[in-house]
Image (tube, helix red, strand yellow):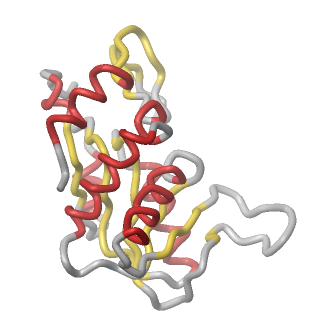
Amino acid sequence: MYDKQALIELVRERALKFGDFTLASGKQAKYYLDCRQLTLDSRGACLVAEGMLEAMGDELPPAVGGMAIGADPITGAIITLAGMRKIPLRGVIVRKDPKGHGTGRTVEGPVEPGEEIVIVEDVVTTGGSSLLAIERCEAFGLKVRRVLAIIDRLEGGAEAFAAQGYELTSLLTVRDFGIESS
């Protein structure tokens, strides 16, 4: 069972940094959420996987995945936990650019066009990374069901997804840390 309070405490302890930062979106911020400190830690990975599996509910898609490299440990944690529970779930890696060798694809994993996928993300600000992952998955022929994030910064990502017809569900928002969106 997902323990939201334990995840909040771990984010505070390991991932939440204050200072002056430039985010992937290009925005300037007074705080940074380094979710690699969660997803590359066994306890954090388990908490995130529990929360995301619970958020997906009973009707799991056949696949989960997101933009390399941030979504890779999230995907790995989810499919590992699903496997331990004997739940059939496959992972996908979405690349910004195709590899110059091998299959040369932007979507890698044991999926076929026509299958459904849930996009996973660590931190959503404007939604740009996940929107690119959605674009790549749809170009491959996958049907994107929705987006799941660890943390929503509440800076327009949910609205950007909604404008494209996708729902964002996050395990946490910045309000869980007493931070108001800018």
The residue depicted at 49 percent of the width and 52 percent of the height is 71
Q: Give the total number of marks visible in the rendering.
A: 0
Q: Quadrant of the N terminus?
A: bottom left
The residue depicted at 28 percent of the width and 41 percent of the height is 151
Please give left or right for residue 76 compared with residue 107 in the image: left
Above or below, comparing residue 94 to residue 83 in the picture: above
Nearest to the observer: residue 42 or residue 17 = 42
Nearest to the observer: residue 176 or residue 128 = 176
Find residue 12 and report its horizontal and vertical position in percent.
27, 22
Name which quarter of the figure residue 179 lies in.
top left
Name which quarter of the figure residue 14 lies in.
top left
Please give left or right for residue 71 compared with residue 181 in the image: right
The residue depicted at 41 percent of the width and 81 percent of the height is 88
Q: Quadrant of the C terminus?
A: top left
The residue depicted at 22 percent of the width and 27 percent of the height is 9
Please give left or right for residue 115 compared with residue 175 in the image: right
Find residue 27 and report its horizontal and vertical position in percent.
41, 27
Please give left or right for residue 61 compared with residue 23 in the image: left
Find residue 100 and report its horizontal and vertical position in percent.
85, 62
Nearest to the observer: residue 59 or residue 42 = 42
Find residue 127 and report its horizontal and vertical position in percent.
37, 49
Residue sitting farthest toward the top:
19
Above or below, comparing residue 12 to residue 46 in the picture: above
Residue sitting farthest toward the bottom:
114
Above or below, comparing residue 160 to residue 42 in the picture: below
